[in-house]
Amino acid sequence: MTGSVAKDSDDDLVFKALASPARRRMLDALKAAPQTTGSLCALLPELDRTTVLQHLRVLERAGLVTGRRVGRERHLSLAPLPIKRIHDRWISGYMRAAVDLLEQLDAE
């Protein structure tokens, strides 16, 4: 697999992970502070534990979450590099274009 194809595949996993409101809520919680699996389950009482674990697997596969065992608990943390990669590749270019457009409107 070429580097570009691998990067596109990685980006696809990140976009898929970000598509779910439940996964975005998990990421928001992890952005604030590391969480245990149990605390994430408590944040999403409408979902059973198995569903939360399935969502976590999607986030981990996308590289957005890392976990480590501490005794019987699993401590989870946000891994921000995939989101930065999406920002650098997709968002920042569109943001520059929007600012340029606003400057053109101001000039007119």
Image (cartoon, helix red, strand yellow):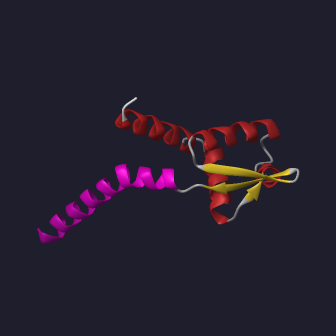
Residue at 56% in and 42% down:
62
Q: Residue furthest top?
A: 1
The residue nearer to you, when weighing 61 against 102, is 61
Residue 56 to residue 74: above or below: above
Please identify the dominant SS of the magenta region. Answer: helix
The range drawn in magenta is 81-108
Q: Residue furthest left?
A: 108
For this view, does 65 lie left or right of residue 102?
A: right
Q: Nearer the viewer, residue 51 or 86?
A: 86
x and y, in percent, of residue 31 in the image: 62, 61
What residue do we see at 75% from left, 36% from top?
A: 51
Quadrant that contains the N terminus: top left
In-image side of 108 versus 95 (left or right): left
> In the figure, 5 relative to 70: above or below?
above
Vertical placement of residue 47 versus 37, above or below: above
Left or right of 23 on screen, residue 102: left
Residue 59: x, y in percent?
62, 43
Pick the front one: 96 or 107 = 96
